[in-house]
Image (spheres, helix red, strand yellow):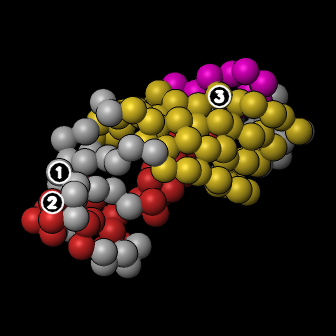
Amino acid sequence: MGSEAGAVLRVGAELPPLEVPVTRTLIVAGAIASRDYQDVHHDAELARQKGSPDVFMNILTTNGLVGRYITDHFGPAAVLRKVAIRLGVPNHPGDTMVLTGRIEEVDGDTATVRVVGANGSGRHVTGTVTVTLPAGDVS
């Protein structure tokens, strides 16, 4: 991905997909970084006792990956104005989450992007991100 000067904000434009390998390290590090010490995010045995086949990603890690997806595409100067997501199926170690996006609305230098992140079990995350590009980066 990567930003290019003069990014086109056009309703219906598709963002390139981003594949995110879901590793145990990513899950545990994301939980620690967001201070989410729930055992289901770092202890496989306790996660199994609670009905999960393994540890699973927390919503804050997912939220960060959605933000990364948008800024990878629009560039580091893009400002995330709103991120509204909903979780679906869990991300477990060994999954690959594929993020896809489509621009749904444009108002000047601001766009609303519909984002979906899916793995082999279905949709892990759905939502919208409102992003503003710096002056001069929009065509």
**Disc 3 residue type?**
Arg
Q: Is residue 14 left or right of residue 29?
A: right
Residue behind mark 2: 48
**Residue 11 is inside the magenta segment:** yes
Q: Comparing marks 1 and 3, which lies closer to the viewer? A: 1
Q: Earlier in the sequence, mark 2 or mark 3?
A: 2
Q: Secondary structure at mark 3?
A: strand
**Mark drawn on residue 102:** 3
Q: CA distance from mark 1 to mark 3?
A: 32 Å
Q: Secondary structure at mark 1?
A: loop
Proximity of marks 2 and 1: CB atoms separated by less than 8 Å: yes
- Whole-percent x and y of residue 114? 65, 36
- Whole-percent x and y of residue 38? 30, 75
Q: Earlier in the sequence, mark 1 or mark 3?
A: 1
Q: Residue at x 15, y 65 (%)?
A: 49
**Residue 13 is inside the magenta segment:** yes
Q: Residue at x 45, y 45 (%)?
A: 88
Instruction: Please state the extent of the stretch shown in magenta in the rendering.
Output: 7-16
Q: Earlier in the sequence, mark 2 or mark 1?
A: 2
Q: Relative to the observer, which residue lies in front, 67 or 2?
A: 67
Q: Is residue 2 left or right of residue 4?
A: left
**Disc 1 residue type?**
Pro
**Res 44 seen here:** yes
Q: Is residue 47 above or below residue 123?
A: below
